[in-house]
């Protein structure tokens, strides 16, 4: 560990900054992209991914995700910049920009500095940095001998709590240098510890180059049983509310992560809260008497979404919204008794507040116009009077917003001003009835200009404990606006088992994979055809993960209904998937509800591989070589079967180094282009052979 004051330039002169912020993909009146997104524009979309609000509520910091330009910049994941804007509006300023990866911005209690996590300036691993709000240069305040996974500044600004693994032993490092680098699967992990470090006094801004504030003591690890994943300070700075899990494995993080209140000085566990299943957001009340959390309702609940409270000293967990048929996603305490929350309700979101006695009100609903965004992030000022939000609408991706209860929200950032020159398809909620009468919904985009039923692409979400909101629905893996601009009707269905409609609805597909949940997709096609929206003879389907499973299922089991399919990181063999995934316990507890070896025949019955001989649907299969969630062998098995059977075009595209989804700019761009080319080739023309395997990247 080391504390350093290394100064790094993080600012540009105003003229250059203006060019940086306003640089956009060109859109002209005679540009075909003006009638819909182009691939280059799709790859250039920026979005806000984190927000923080100053203690006095006057300023909002946000992290802007900036994609690299495929084929131009050095390939890699998006950059993440730090920006600052007044909570009342005004120009946004880039504080840390360029080739950086900023995360977790936090204001000091006096509001003079912003702390953030990043790897820069020669860092071997992510460190904690600070930058003066009044202007100046970034300097490193904490570097550790292992990767800092997350951190929190204490309420007084005198300590840093962070999560990092135990350092690798010198013996292990020496052995690895000699070639003994074997991996002992799921055993050779190092525990994740909670560490406390004294924060040396920050110099009055601007900092004096070379100032180091003295050498504080080395950080100390709290001796806790298990591995820590997240942590938050109590308001008085004497305690930490943190999560512990038996091992730092993905499965344990999903299913066995439990909330604990510990003494920050000695690490003594003061209280344990037995959240009954999956765990989300959590916080200690301003007075320190209560703890609130977003939790699953029971061990078999597919998704955390209940708002629970308990005495901070320990005790019974109580649902503050017991009759709420939605999913809470974020929370923050407004005062000692009142919790502000964000929740999904159908395809919209709400911001509400609730008292400890259960009384409360909804303060904001999305869908009420351009000033009512779908909300996906929340940060609250010290007095609880103003919030910073992450919000999106059908017309623009996630941006920074401010919101004061009783007033309309205010959009603070405009990260893609060029979108104003692009003609986007109209987007609306479409409701339909399944064959058993269950009312379902989804998001429908129709081509800006069309004559009669259009070719249809179903874009199926994964999870299945997920859902599509009525916000910005376009990304590299589901290029909805791009497809609509090319003449397609696009439907993103929320089939049974989706979230946003309460616990009971999210459990409707449990134990019955590819049953009524995927019949809902066929019913969606029929409903859209009956409404005159879709041509039932020209239907394509695509999706990733569980949506990839749906794609493979429809392309095999219901091949006569599907003219083209694109499966991404999808499932083809339920038996082998269950035993090769990194979440086997989660899969059994909240999805299948059985041990796979006890229902071998049923698992195969619900596997697309079992229906490969039926497949006449041209199928493009794609995924990363390093996917630990859905093993790459799932793609290979289906590809090999369809190739050997030889009844339909099939192609397998593998992305080296990518996991359960693509992170690198080139891989994202390649996948989006291949997806749409496959659909165009088989839905807009009467082709029976696949397009060339090489891809031309002309826009």
Image: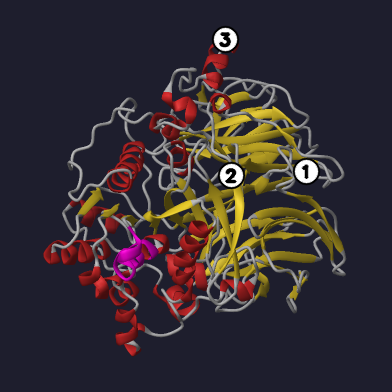
Of callouts 1 and 3, which one flags the residue occurring earlier in the amino acid sequence? Answer: 3
Of residues 291 and 109, the one nearer the viewer is: 291
Residue 53 in view, yes or no: yes
The residue singled out by tag 3 in the image is: 15
Q: Position of residue 622 (x, y in %)?
A: 28, 53
Report the magenta residues as a range: 550-562
Mark closer to the observer (2, 1): 2
Disc 3 is placed on an element classified as: helix
Q: CA distance from mark 1 to mark 3?
A: 32 Å
Relative to 212, residue 376 above or below:
below
Query: Is the Cβ of the residue at disc 2 closer than 8 Å to that at disc 3?
Result: no
The residue singled out by tag 2 in the image is: 427
Q: Is residue 665 magenta?
A: no
Disc 2 is placed on an element classified as: strand
> Within 10 Å of the Cα at label 1, are there few (<14), some (14-19), or many (20+) other Cα atoms?
many
The residue singled out by tag 1 in the image is: 381
């Amino acid at each position: 560990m080391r504390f350093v004051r290394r100064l790094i330039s993080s600012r540009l002169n105003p003229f250059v900054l203006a060019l940086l912020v306003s640089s956009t993909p060109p859109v002209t009146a005679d540009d075909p992209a003006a009638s819909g997104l182009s691939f280059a524009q799709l790859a250039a979309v920026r979005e806000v991914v984190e927000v923080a609000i100053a203690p006095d509520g006057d300023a909002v910091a946000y992290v802007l995700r900036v994609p690299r330009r495929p084929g131009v910049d050095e390939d890699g994941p998006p950059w993440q910049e730090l920006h600052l804007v007044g909570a009342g509006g005004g120009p946004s300023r880039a504080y840390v920009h360029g080739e950086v990866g900023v995360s977790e911005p936090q204001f000091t209690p006096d509001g003079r500095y912003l702390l953030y996590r990043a790897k820069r300036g020669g860092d071997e691993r992510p460190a904690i940095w600070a930058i003066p709000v009044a202007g100046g240069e970034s300097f490193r305040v904490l570097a550790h001998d292992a990767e800092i996974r997350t951190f929190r500044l204490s309420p007084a600004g005198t300590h840093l709590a962070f999560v990092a693994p135990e350092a690798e032993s010198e013996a292990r490092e020496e052995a690895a240098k000699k070639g003994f680098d074997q991996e002992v699967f799921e055993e050779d992990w190092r525990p994740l510890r909670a560490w406390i470090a004294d924060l040396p006094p920050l110099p009055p801004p601007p900092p004096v180059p070379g100032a180091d504030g003295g050498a504080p003591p080395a950080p100390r690890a709290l001796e806790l049983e298990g591995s820590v994943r997240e942590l938050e300070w109590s308001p008085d700075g004497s305690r930490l509310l943190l999560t512990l899990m038996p091992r730092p494995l993905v499965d344990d993080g999903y299913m066995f992560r439990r909330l604990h209140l510990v003494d920050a000085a000695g690490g003594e566990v003061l209280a344990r809260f037995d959240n009954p299943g999956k765990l989300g957001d959590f916080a200690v009340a301003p007075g320190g008497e209560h703890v609130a959390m977003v939790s699953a309702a029971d061990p078999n609940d597919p998704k955390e979404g209940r708002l629970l409270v308990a005495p901070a000293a320990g005790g019974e967990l109580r649902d503050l919204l017991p009759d709420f048929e939605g999913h809470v996603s974020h929370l923050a305490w407004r005062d000692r008794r009142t919790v502000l929350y964000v929740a999904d309700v159908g395809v919209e979101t709400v911001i509400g507040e609730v008292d400890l006695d259960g009384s409360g009100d909804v303060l904001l609903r999305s869908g009420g116009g351009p000033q009512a965004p779908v909300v996906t992030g929340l940060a609250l000022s010290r007095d609880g009077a103003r919030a910073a939000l992450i919000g999106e609408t059908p017309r623009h991706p996630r941006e920074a917003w401010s919101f004061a209860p009783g007033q309309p929200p205010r959009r603070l950032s405009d990260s893609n001003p060029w979108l104003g020159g692009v003609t986007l398809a109209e987007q609306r909620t479409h409701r339909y009835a399944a064959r058993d009468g269950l009312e379902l919904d989804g998001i429908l985009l129709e081509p800006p200009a069309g004559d009669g039923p259009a070719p249809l692409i179903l874009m199926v979400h994964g999870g299945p404990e997920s859902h599509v909101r009525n916000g910005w629905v376009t990304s590299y893996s589901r290029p909805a606006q791009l497809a609509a601009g090319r003449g397609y009707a696009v439907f993103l269905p929320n089939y049974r088992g989706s979230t946003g409609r309460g616990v009971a609805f999210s459990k409707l597909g449990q134990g019955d994979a590819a049953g009524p949940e995927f019949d809902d997709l066929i019913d969606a096609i029929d409903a859209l055809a009956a409404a005159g929206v879709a041509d039932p003879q020209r239907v394509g389907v695509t999706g990733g993960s569980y949506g990839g499973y749906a794609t493979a299922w429809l392309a095999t089991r219901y091949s006569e209904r599907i003219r083209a399919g694109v499966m991404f990181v999808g499932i083809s063999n339920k038996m082998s998937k269950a035993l090769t995934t990194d979440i086997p316990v989660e899969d059994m507890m909240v999805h299948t509800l059985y041990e796979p070896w006890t229902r071998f025949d049923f698992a195969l019955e619900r596997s697309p591989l079992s229906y490969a001989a039926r497949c006449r649907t041209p199928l493009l299969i794609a995924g990363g070589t390093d996917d630990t969630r859905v093993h790459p062998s799932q793609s290979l098995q289906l590809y090999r079967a369809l190739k050997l059977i030889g009844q339909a075009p099939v192609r397998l595209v593998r992305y080296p180094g990518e996991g359960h989804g693509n992170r690198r700019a080139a891989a994202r761009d390649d996948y989006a282009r291949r997806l749409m080319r496959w659909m165009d080739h088989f839905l807009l023309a009467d082709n029976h052979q696949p397009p060339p395997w090489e891809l031309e990247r002309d826009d």
